[in-house]
């Protein structure tokens, strides 16, 4: 089984990037090993896995080891962060689209989405509903975010304030949102959001203490 550190080394070798090498590579240890460990505790092997917002593909590379079929979904086109060669070699399907308006064919029995929710420019409840709809009944969804209680968001401008319900619904605005962080979360607001799509939600803290981990199961089937 490939390790987290080996994944990072391979990603850097495949697609050298100064930001990844000097900054991002030091952020990933705050949450990615916890995501991997949580998945391993639940199940050792999966049929279909989807990684939403994969960044440079560190977690994606690990998912190839535990799933028969791996897909990724991102609004950033392949080749910008994830190399075309890596996708082709690992037989990974890339969907260049948004989780707010996706045609990704499910169902999946594992979906991951790390460090994405705080950056969504629309109300994330639509994204959570869409994720729930493309999951198997016994599927697992795992996400991670910075906890606003342990991270200083005060220096980061946020157009919509601290609460995710203040974000506009999907399609209500057309102009791009320049803010890096559009909403902020603690364990209670994250639980509230994830419960909109799943009947079972467990929130825990990563070993780094600054990250929250959400593990969800039993996707709700009463969502229209």
Image (cartoon, grey):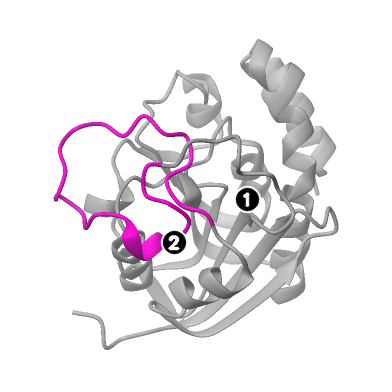
Image point (64%, 40%), residue name:
61
Query: Is 67 part of what is drawn in magenta?
Result: no
Question: In the picture shown, does residue 160 fall above or below 206?
Answer: above
Question: In the picture shown, does residue 148 fall above or below 90?
Answer: below
Say what secondary structure mark 1 lies in: helix
Residue 163 disc label: 2
Label 1 or label 2, whichever comes before in sequence order: 1
Give how far across and how far down residue 178 sits, in percent.
36, 29
Q: Nearer the viewer, residue 67 or 212?
A: 212
Let me know if residue 220 appears in the view.
yes
Residue 78 falls in which quadrant of the image? top left
Give how far across and how far down residue 143 sits, in percent.
57, 60
- Give the overall secondary structure of the magenta segment: loop
Give how far across and how far down residue 149 sits, in percent.
70, 59
Quadrant of the frame with the C terminus: bottom left
Question: In the picture shown, does residue 71 fall above or below 46?
Answer: above
Image point (61%, 47%), residue name:
64
Looking at the rendering, the stretch of residues picked out in magenta corresponds to 159-184
Residue 204 falls in which quadrant of the image? bottom right
Image point (67%, 64%), residue name:
213
Residue 141 in the figure: left or right of residue 21: left
Give how far across and how far down residue 79 sits, in percent.
45, 19
Badge 1 is on which residue? 63
Query: Is 175 part of what is drawn in magenta?
Result: yes
Q: Residues within 10 Å of mark 1 (few under 14, many from 20)?
A: many
Image point (53%, 80%), residue name:
217
Say what secondary structure mark 2 lies in: loop
């Amino acid at each position: 089984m490939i390790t987290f550190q080996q994944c990072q080394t391979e990603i850097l070798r495949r697609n050298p990037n100064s930001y990844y090498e000097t900054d991002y590579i030091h952020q990933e240890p705050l949450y990615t090993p916890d995501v991997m460990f949580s998945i391993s505790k639940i199940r050792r092997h999966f049929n279909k896995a989807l990684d939403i917002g994969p960044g440079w593909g560190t977690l994606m590379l690990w998912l190839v080891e535990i799933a028969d079929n791996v897909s990724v979904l991102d609004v950033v086109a392949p080749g910008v962060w994830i190399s075309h060669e890596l996708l082709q070699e690992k037989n990974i399907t890339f969907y260049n689209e948004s989780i707010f308006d996706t045609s990704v064919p499910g169902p999946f029995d594992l979906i991951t989405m790390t460090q994405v929710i705080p950056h969504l420019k629309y109300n994330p409840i639509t994204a959570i509903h869409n994720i729930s709809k493309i999951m198997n009944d016994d599927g697992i969804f795992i996400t991670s975010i910075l906890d606003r209680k342990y991270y200083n968001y005060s220096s980061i401008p946020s157009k919509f304030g601290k609460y995710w319900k203040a974000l506009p619904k999907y399609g209500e605005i057309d102009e791009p949102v320049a803010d890096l962080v559009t909403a902020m979360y603690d364990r209670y607001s994250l639980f509230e959001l994830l419960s909109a799509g799943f009947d079972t939600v467990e929130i825990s803290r990563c070993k780094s203490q600054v990250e929250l981990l959400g593990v969800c199961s039993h996707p709700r089937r009463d969502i229209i």
